[in-house]
Amino acid sequence: MSALTVSQDPEQSWDDLVRFWEEMEWPEGSRVEIIEGIVTVSPAPAYSHNLIAARIQRRLYSVIPEDWEIFQTQAIAVPSRLGMFIPDLVVAPVRDHTDLESHIPAALAELVVEVTSKSNARHDRVSKPAAYAAAGIPLFLLVDRWAPDGPAATLYGDPKGDVYRPLLTAKFGEPLKLPAPFDLVIDTAEFPAP
């Protein structure tokens, strides 16, 4: 099943978009994001998609500081790109944000992980990385099960403007090393192929 877009007034402000996103009753279990100013509703990820995210999460817990957390359903906001994203994983320091109910500023994240779904891989490959780079998130890991040259995981870093520099790519089955502050090797052989 593919994503559904909800038409919005092109003159609508960021605050109006966020209010609509927060107040609308969306289908249970769906992932609702604002991508380039358009509200996008996607079905819940498939089992193999979640399995990849869970395996990465388990490895990350062994290396993150005590005052950091890994979130699976945390919305992160990039107002400059008209984006409200729910990455598969967000690694961020825990801070007192009692004023934040539904989302946090994307700039708080240290690492964002996206696992592609066949129906909306373009968002994970193009729109989201541009927004994450613009927000200054230091590292972005794209696990692309549907990559044109075969399943692969690519780590991006050194954001400048809305562009990341590819740091390394590992085909499924090869190790992927995350740099400091993680200093972690992820075994992509554990990832189920499509």
Image (spheres, grey):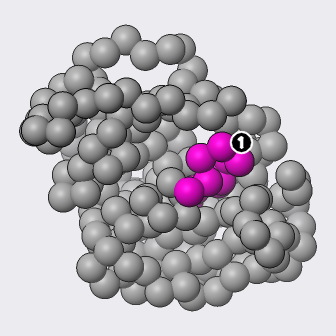
Q: Position of residue 112 (x, y in %)?
A: 48, 61
> Toward the viewer: 168 or 128?
128
Q: Residue at x 54, y 25 (%)?
A: 30
Q: Position of residue 114 (x, y in %)?
A: 57, 56
Residue bearing mark 1: 50
Q: Residue at x 54, y 42 (%)?
A: 72
**Is 145 on the left or on the right of 166, as rendered?**
right
Which of the 4 quarters of the picture holds residue 132? bottom left
Figure quadrant of the N terminus: top right
**Is 135 on the left or on the right of 194, as rendered?**
left
* Whether residue 186 can be seen here: no
Q: Position of residue 69 (x, y in %)?
A: 46, 51
> Toward the viewer: 26 or 6?
6
Q: Residue at x 43, y 16 (%)?
A: 26
Does the stretch in magenta take in 60?
Answer: no
Q: Position of residue 51 (x, y in %)?
A: 77, 45
Does the stretch in magenta take in 121?
Answer: yes
Tag 1 secondary structure = helix
Compared with residue 61, is residue 100 higher up or lower down, i.e. above or below? above
Q: Amino acid at mark 1?
A: Asn
> Toward the viewer: 39 or 102?
39
Instruction: Please report the bounds of the magenta region as a residue range.
Output: 113-122
